[in-house]
Amino acid sequence: MVHDHVTRARQTVDMPPTYIKVVVGLASVIPLIAGVRNIVAPGTPLSFIPEDDVFQAHLHGSPKDPRMAYVFQLFGCCLLYAVAAKLLLAFGHSEGTYLRRQIMVAYGVLDFLFAYLAYDYWPQAQKSVVAGFALMHCVEGSVFLGDALLRPRPVKLGKGRNFGKAA
């Protein structure tokens, strides 16, 4: 089956490279856990995230404000939306090469914006509270933008405008 062989070869080319899957997978772990935490137990520090107790106390106050807990539950949902979309982008179906490129540009830019806003908020003496988080988003944003702007994407043959034309 020549067609089956060509389809499998094209799918291999269209999927994001392994390094993108590794970076997205690793960069999704903490936001996934934090998103679930924010929904289930907003304001509760996670001991394995450096200085999360400082971050949570600063934003939630003492005693904990129920309105801020509600805002963090909504933020937790937003984190889970983003994580799910990034994981589907990296590990999902092999088609949609150009759409995937556009989404990678959007996520890359937003990763840098998110890192900047998170880091810029804290005074110089407390930048360590979010430095690792900001760095993680800068690495992920760099990988997304690098792939979107530098990896060649061959035109596919098949239905639509290119039907019957040579690549």
Image (spheres, rainbow, N blue to C red):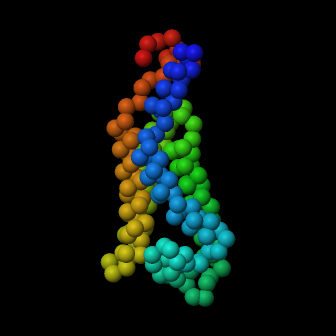
Q: Residue placed at 49% from the left, 36% from the top?
A: 15
139, above or below 64, in the image: above
78, above or below 48, in the image: above
Q: How many labels does the image show?
A: 0
Tell me the quarter of the image containing the C terminus. top left
Residue 73, given in percent of the width and then of the height, sits at: 64, 68
Farthest top residue in view: 164
Farthest bottom residue in view: 63
Farthest front residue in view: 1
Residue 49, given in percent of the width and then of the height, sits at: 48, 73
101, above or below 131, in the image: above
122, above or below 6, in the image: below
Q: Residue placed at 55% from the left, 84% from the top?
A: 61
In this rendering, does residue 106 appear at all?
no
Tell me the quarter of the image containing the N terminus. top right
Q: Residue placed at 40% from the left, 40% from the top?
A: 148
In this rendering, does residue 66 appear at all?
yes
Residue 18, given in percent of the width and then of the height, sits at: 44, 43
Residue 41, given in percent of the width and then of the height, sits at: 65, 74
Q: Seen in the image, is 62 located left or right of residue 26?
A: right
Q: Residue placed at 57% from the left, 61% from the top?
A: 32
Q: Seen in the image, is 72 located left or right of residue 49?
A: right
